[in-house]
Image: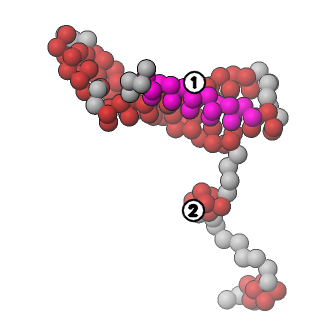
């Protein structure tokens, strides 16, 4: 051990090391705007990756009436409904976060308090709309 390191330990100075992902996820509390930003990217990537599969299913369902009935039966399965609910959340979150970004592009709500407030509204509105879609999807109304 070098002399400088021994001196630092003897004086009680903190030792700095590289931080890992567990330090970031467990010790650091992200503000709502950071959460919305990360979820905006995740939802966009999820929709982008699911798009070819969804377009293929749409094309196959339009081939004939029997193929439509077949795919309607698949969509009535609870697991398929959960996947559709997840894609609905991705779309609704991406849409509401995109509207927030449009306001910010026009120099509205740029200060810290307003940005955090609009981020909370994005989370609340997207989750409320997803809950409504889920209620409709699972046949509550």
Pointer 2 residue:
22
Mark 2 and mark 1 lie on one chain; the one further toward the N terminus is 2
* Total count of labels: 2
* Magenta region, main secondary structure: helix
Q: Is residue 125 left or right of residue 66?
A: right
Q: Tell me: residue 25, above or below residue 3.
A: above
Q: Quadrant of residue 1?
A: bottom right
Q: Secondary structure at mark 2?
A: helix
Label 2 Cα crowd, 10 Å radius (few <14 / some 14-19 / many 20+): few
Residue 24 within the segment the image draws in magenta: no
Q: Tell me: residue 9, above or below residue 73.
A: below
Q: Is residue 94 visible?
A: no
Q: Residue at x 66, y 71 (%)?
A: 17
Instruction: Verify CB contact (< 8 Å) between mark 2 and mark 1.
Output: no
Q: Which residues are magenta?
A: 117-137
Q: Is residue 42 left or right of residue 72?
A: right
Q: Is residue 62 left or right of residue 47?
A: left
Label 1 Cα crowd, 10 Å radius (few <14 / some 14-19 / many 20+): some
Q: Which mark is residue 75?
A: none
Q: Position of residue 99 (x, y in %)?
A: 65, 22
Residue 132 within the segment the image draws in magenta: yes
Q: Nearer the viewer, residue 63 or 89?
A: 89
Q: Secondary structure at mark 1?
A: helix
Looking at the figure, which quarter contains the C terminus?
top left
Pointer 1 residue:
95
Q: Position of residue 8 (x, y in %)?
A: 78, 84
Q: Position of residue 4 (x, y in %)?
A: 77, 85
Q: Is residue 128 visible?
A: yes
Q: Residue at x 63, y 37 (%)?
A: 36
Q: Tell me: residue 136, above or below residue 62.
A: below
Q: Residue at x 62, y 34 (%)?
A: 123
Q: CA distance from mark 2 to mark 1?
A: 31 Å
């Amino acid at each position: 051990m070098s002399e400088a390191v021994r001196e630092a330990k003897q004086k009680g100075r903190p030792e700095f090391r590289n931080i890992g992902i567990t330090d970031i996820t467990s010790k650091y509390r992200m503000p709502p705007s950071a959460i919305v930003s990360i979820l905006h990217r995740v939802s966009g990537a999820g929709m982008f990756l699911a798009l070819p599969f969804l377009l293929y299913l749409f094309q196959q369902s339009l081939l004939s009436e029997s193929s439509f009935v077949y795919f309607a039966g698949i969509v009535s399965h609870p697991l398929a409904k959960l996947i559709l609910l997840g894609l609905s959340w991705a779309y609704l979150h991406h849409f509401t976060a995109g509207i927030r970004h449009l306001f910010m592009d026009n120099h509205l709500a740029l200060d810290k308090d307003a940005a955090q407030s609009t981020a909370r509204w994005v989370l609340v509105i997207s989750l409320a709309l997803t809950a409504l879609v889920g209620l409709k999807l699972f046949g509550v109304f």
